[in-house]
Image: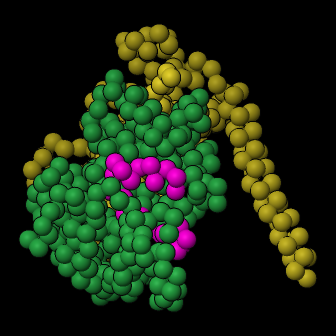
Chain colours: A yellow, B green
Amino acid sequence: MHRCLSFGFTWFGWLAALVTMGAVGIFVGFLGIKGLAALNLRLFFGEASPWQVLLGTQPAVGGLWPACLGTLYLVLLSSLLAIPLGIASGIYLARYASPGPKRLFGFAVDLLAGIPSILMGLFGFALILLLRKTILPQANTGLLLSAGCLALLVLPYLILTTQTALEGLSPTLHVAGLSLGFTPWQNLVHILLPAASRGILSGVILAVGRAAEDTAVILLTGVVANAGAPQSLTDKFTALPFHIYYLAAEHRTADELAQAFGAALMLLLLTASLYALAYGLHAGIAKKWEHTPIIRP
Amino acid sequence: MGTHTDNSTLAALVDGLSVSFGPRQVLENLHLSLAKGRLHVLLGRSGAGKTTLLRAFNRLNECFPGCRTQGSLRLNLHQQWVDIYGDDLSVIELRRRVGMVFQTPNLLPTGVAKNISLPLKLVLGLGKNEIPARVEWALQQVHLWEEVRHRLAAPAATLSGGQQQRLCLARVLALEPMLLLLDEPTASLDFRASRKIEELLLTLKDRYPILAVSHSLSQARRLGDEVLVMKDGRLARTLNRRDFQDKTMLEDLLAEVF
C-alpha cells in the first residue's frame, strides 16, 4: 500500500512537472508563431522612418515604439522607487524590529500584498484629485504617478523575499562576523546581504515582472492610447500591456490583431531582458564578493 | 581586585559574574582568573553554562535575546586593566582583541583567503599591500599554508572539517588577539583532526592565554594547565596539573561532573 502510494505520488509529480512545462511551451510557441509573423519595422515605427524616430525628430504614430519605451521607463522608475525601499524594509523586519512593531509592520505588508491592483490605481487617481483640490491645482496623472503606484504594488514582494532570505541564514553566520569585531553594518553589508542575495534577487524578478505586466494600475493613473514616447515624468504615456489590451479589444482588422500578438511577444522579450539584467547584476555582485585576491607564494 | 599581589601575570579577572537570559539564570556569581601563558579548560556537562561563560568574554551573549550580565570582567590589555562591560572599550574593539573559535567551523561563504583577508580589511583596516603577507603568516601558524597555498581562491567550504576549523583559528590569529576563546573546537572533528588541533593549541598557549570549552575529561587532561569544572552555572572546582595525577580525585571529579 505504502509503495503504491509512493509510486503514484512520484508519477503525479512527474505529470505535474510535464503539464507545467507543456503549458509554458505551448504558450511561448503560440505567441512566438503569431507574434514573429507580425514583427517588422512597421510594427515598431508605424509609417515613420526608424532613424527619424530613434533620433527623436519624428513621432512613431501607430507603432509599438512609444509603448516599449513607456513600459521600460515605467519598470525602471518603479524599480528605482521600490527596490531600495523594499530591501531596506525587509532588512528592518529581519534584523532590527522588536516583536511589537514587527507584528504590526508584518501585518501591514501582508495587507498591502493582498490589495488588488485596480484599487492601487484608484488610490493614485484619488490622490491626484485630492492634490488638485488642495495644494497642486495643476497636478495630473502621468508616468511618475503610475510608477509610484506600481512601486507600492510590488513593494510587498521585495519586503517579504528580503526578510525571508535574511531570516533563513544560519544563526552561526549571524555571529561569525560579529565575533570577529565587525560592526553590525559591516556584518550586514559584507556577510548577510551577499549570503541572502539569491533570495533577494528572486524578489526583484517578481517585482519587475509584476510592474511590467500590470494594466489596472496604469489604466487609472496616466496611460492613454496612442500617446507618444514620454518626454518628462509628468507626461501621459502608453505601455505594452495596455497597448495589447487596447488592440485586442478594439481591433477592426486582422492586421491590428496581429499587431497585438507582436506587442505581446515584445512584452515577453522586454521582461526577459530585464530578468537577464537582474541576473547579470547579481552575478557581478556575487563574483566581486567571492573573489579572492590572488596571493603569490 | 586589590587582593592580588601581582596582577601582571594574569590575563583576565572575573568578579561576581552573573548572566541570565530572560528568567533563566545561566551563570551565578562566578569568580575566576586566567593566567598568561596557560591553557584553561572549562569542563562540565552540557547546560552547565560553559559556552555562556566563554561568550561573556567577548560579549557575544548580547547577540541573543533577553541577555542580562552583572558583575565585572576585566582584561589585561598591555598591562592595563579594562572592564569590558564598562565604557573604556567598545564591543567592536573588544571582539577584535578577543578571538573566538566556534564548535562547528563557521566560515564565511567565500574563498579560503578571503575568510582571513575580509576581516583584516574591515576590522583592522589593513591595505592591499599588507594583507597577503598577514594571510600567509596566519595560515602558517595553523600549519595550513602548505595544504591550501594552491587553492586560496577556492570556496572555503571545499576544505575538510579539520582544515576548516584550522582556517577559523587562522582567521582569529590574523587579528592578533589578546585572548583566545575556543568553544569545543574539536567537537565536530574526527580523532586525527582533533589531535592536530590539540597539538596546535599547545604551541599557541605561550603567546595567547587560552580558555577552551571541552566535554571530554581526557582532552582536558591532555591540554589543560588548569581545569575549571562547572556545574549548574557555578564554578565547582579548579584543578591544576598536579591534581590530575591523583587517581581518586579524578574519580571523584568524574562522579561529580558527569
Q: Nearer the viewer, residue A44 or A27?
A: A27
Residue B18 is inside the magenta segment: no
Name which residue lies at 10% across and 57% down: B88
Name which residue lies at 43% across and 15% down: A53
In this rendering, would A130 be left or right of A71? Answer: left
Q: State the image coordinates of residue B54 (x, y, percent, origin top left).
A: 35, 68
In this rendering, would B61 be left or right of A25? Answer: left
Instruction: Using the image, determine if residue B111 lies above or below residue B51.
Output: above
> Would residue B19 be seen by someone viewing this image from the given angle?
yes
> Would residue B99 be seen by someone viewing this image from the given angle?
no
In this rendering, would B14 be left or right of B258? Answer: left
Instruction: Say which quarter of the image contains residue A113.
Output: bottom left
In this rendering, would A205 be left or right of B80? Answer: right
Name which residue lies at 22% across and 58% down: B9
Residue B219 is inside the magenta segment: yes
Provide the residue span drawn in magenta. B198-220
Q: State the image coordinates of residue A75 (x, y, percent, origin top left).
A: 42, 39
Q: Nearer the viewer, residue A223 or B96?
A: B96
Instruction: Say which quarter of the image contains residue B175.
Output: top left
Q: State the image coordinates of residue B183 (x, y, percent, origin top left).
A: 44, 64
Instruction: Say which quarter of the image contains residue A73.
Output: top left
Q: State the image coordinates of residue A129 (x, y, percent, origin top left).
A: 21, 54
The quarter of the rendered structure image containing the N terminus of chain A is bottom right
Name which residue lies at 28% across and 57% down: B36
Instruction: Using the image, determine if residue A229 lies above or below residue B40.
Output: above
